[in-house]
């Protein structure tokens, strides 16, 4: 027993020595300024940000701090910013507070999150009127149909068929709202319709007996549920209020695509700053967490589409099983081999090894794409969290921030600084590498 613990301790120390070698020469500091900025603190009360709670987002104040620390706050011509993992659109909305207003281009592969980011950003630019009156009309028409025996087509996702999860009356109301909005969408591509589709999707969790809890949706039978129509109208009113009070002139676009490759971004665009928070290698399946909204809106309609969507995401979860070319694994062997050597044998070992290799390969592909997009002298700020996998006290620490820096070097970038926002406590593991950080990277002039 003691011999086994000694071997495990040696393996842990060897891994931490590997991480220290990789980050050698890079400035490292405890950055209290970032402690409350790497999580969505206060976003729930901020205009536009509050339209949908994305637990994995960062704070609306992160961009301003990064711009200041990179010395970009005195660029008078206006910045051009890229966010390859746009998520809920935090970067695009936050940029509107900067002067002059930067142009923000975002890429997001999840269709629901893309809708969320794009309607926020577009609403700040177009500022549509009459949203509440349209929501009221849609609700009246939907209500007239739910009082009849009319049957509505449910999403094929089994969660919607479970009566414990969704009271049937509330589900019918949601389906009627979406059906009415789908009819309006066929008439024309209207931002107001997309805003109300978001309002309907954002009502799904509040009217159900489900709650997002870390890695999954959990059954919560004693939950204080909302009424579908009232919740829909409340959210529409909230949107209208924020749009009416918006004085900023947003700039740029949010595009549906693969953030690792960014082929959807026009080739003639170059950027001063890339700021993003990629999925952390922490076993959270983001496709699963936000599946209700995507299925309700018809963005995913069957199991095959759901599987393909999962495969489009960054390899941060063992369920993402993509074939990896052998030559690619050889190219990153020096980075990942010491981590893989610490994985204990067992049923999860192969999946964890694949995840770590796939994660680093995705990061390398991301930075190679950024090398074609970032101007000489440009900056990258990447907010990322490390994780531990395995038995309490001896699990494998996956230092995502160190892996980010290693991948950036492979693509020709110069890592500058690791700003440690906060230390984490996970599974009684005392590693100094259990932390959440912002990595600063530069593109030297060629």
Image (cartoon, rainbow, N blue to C red):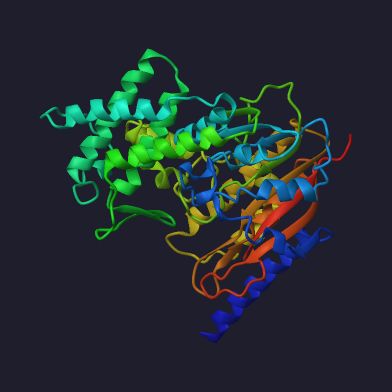
Q: Which of 75 and 337 is in front in this view?
A: 75
Q: Residue at x 80, y 41 (%)?
A: 412
Q: 313 left or right of 294?
A: right
Q: Position of residue 272 (x, y in %)?
A: 78, 35
Q: Position of residue 137 (x, y in %)?
A: 30, 25
In the image, residue 391 sits, relative to residue 155, either above or below, namely below
Q: Spot the residue most to the top.
A: 187
**Residue at screen point 43% across, 55% down:** 215
| Foreground residue among 318 and 305 | 305
State the residue lying farthest toward the left.
149
Q: Position of residue 157 (x, y in %)?
A: 28, 39
* Percent of width and height locating residue 192: 44, 25
**Residue 109 makes an appearance in the image:** no
Position of 205 with respect to 384 (left or right) is left
Count of number-bearing discs? 0
Pick the front one: 163 or 352: 163
Q: Is residue 59 left or right of residue 79?
A: left
Q: In this view, does 433 lie to the left or right of 120?
A: right
Residue, x 41% and y 25% (percent of image)? 193
- The picture quadrant where one finds residue 386 is bottom right
Residue at screen point 37% across, 41% down: 234
Query: Which quadrant of the figure contains the C terminus?
Result: top right
Judge whether residue 24 can be spotted in this image: yes
Residue at far right of view: 446
């Amino acid at each position: 027993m003691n011999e086994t613990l000694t071997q495990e301790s040696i393996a842990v120390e060897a891994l931490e020595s590997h991480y220290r070698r990789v980050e050698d020469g890079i400035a490292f500091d405890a950055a209290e300024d970032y402690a409350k900025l790497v999580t969505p603190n206060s976003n729930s009360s901020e205009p536009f940000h509050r339209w949908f709670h994305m637990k994995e987002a960062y704070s609306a104040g992160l961009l301003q701090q990064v711009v200041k620390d990179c010395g970009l706050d005195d660029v008078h011509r206006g910045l051009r910013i890229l966010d390859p993992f746009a998520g809920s659109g935090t970067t695009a909305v936050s940029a509107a507070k900067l002067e002059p207003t930067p142009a923000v281009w975002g890429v997001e592969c999840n269709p629901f999150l893309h809708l969320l980011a794009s309607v926020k950003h577009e609403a700040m630019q177009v500022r549509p009127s009459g949203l509440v009156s349209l929501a009221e009309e849609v609700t009246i028409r939907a209500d007239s149909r739910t009082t009849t025996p009319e049957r509505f087509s449910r999403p094929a996702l089994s969660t919607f068929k479970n009566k414990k999860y969704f009271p049937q009356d509330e589900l019918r109301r949601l389906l009627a709202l979406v059906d009415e909005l789908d009819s309006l969408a066929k008439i024309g591509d209207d931002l107001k319709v997309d805003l109300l589709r978001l309002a309907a999707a954002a009502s799904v969790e509040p009217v159900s007996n489900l709650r997002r809890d870390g890695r999954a949706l959990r059954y919560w039978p004693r939950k204080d549920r909302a009424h579908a129509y009232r919740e829909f109208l409340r959210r529409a009113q909230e949107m209208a209020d924020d749009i009416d009070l918006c004085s900023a002139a947003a700039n740029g676009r949010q595009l549906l695509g693969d953030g690792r490759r960014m082929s959807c971004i026009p080739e003639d665009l170059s950027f001063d700053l890339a700021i993003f928070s990629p999925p952390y290698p922490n076993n959270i399946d983001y496709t699963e967490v936000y599946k209700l909204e995507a299925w309700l809106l018809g963005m995913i309609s069957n199991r095959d589409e759901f599987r393909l969507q999962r495969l489009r995401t960054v390899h941060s979860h063992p369920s993402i099983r993509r074939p990896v070319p052998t030559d690619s694994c050889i190219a990153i062997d020096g980075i990942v081999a010491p981590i893989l050597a610490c994985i204990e044998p067992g049923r999860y070992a192969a999946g964890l090894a694949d995840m770590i290799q796939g994660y680093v390969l995705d990061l390398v592909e991301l930075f190679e794409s950024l090398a074609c997009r970032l101007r000489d002298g440009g900056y990258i700020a990447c907010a990322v969290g490390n994780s531990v996998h395995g038995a309490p006290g001896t699990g494998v620490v996956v230092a995502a921030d160190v892996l980010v820096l290693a991948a950036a070097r492979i693509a020709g970038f110069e890592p500058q600084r690791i700003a440690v926002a906060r230390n984490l406590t996970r599974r009684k593991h005392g590693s100094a590498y259990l932390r959440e950080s912002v990595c600063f990277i530069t593109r030297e002039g060629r």
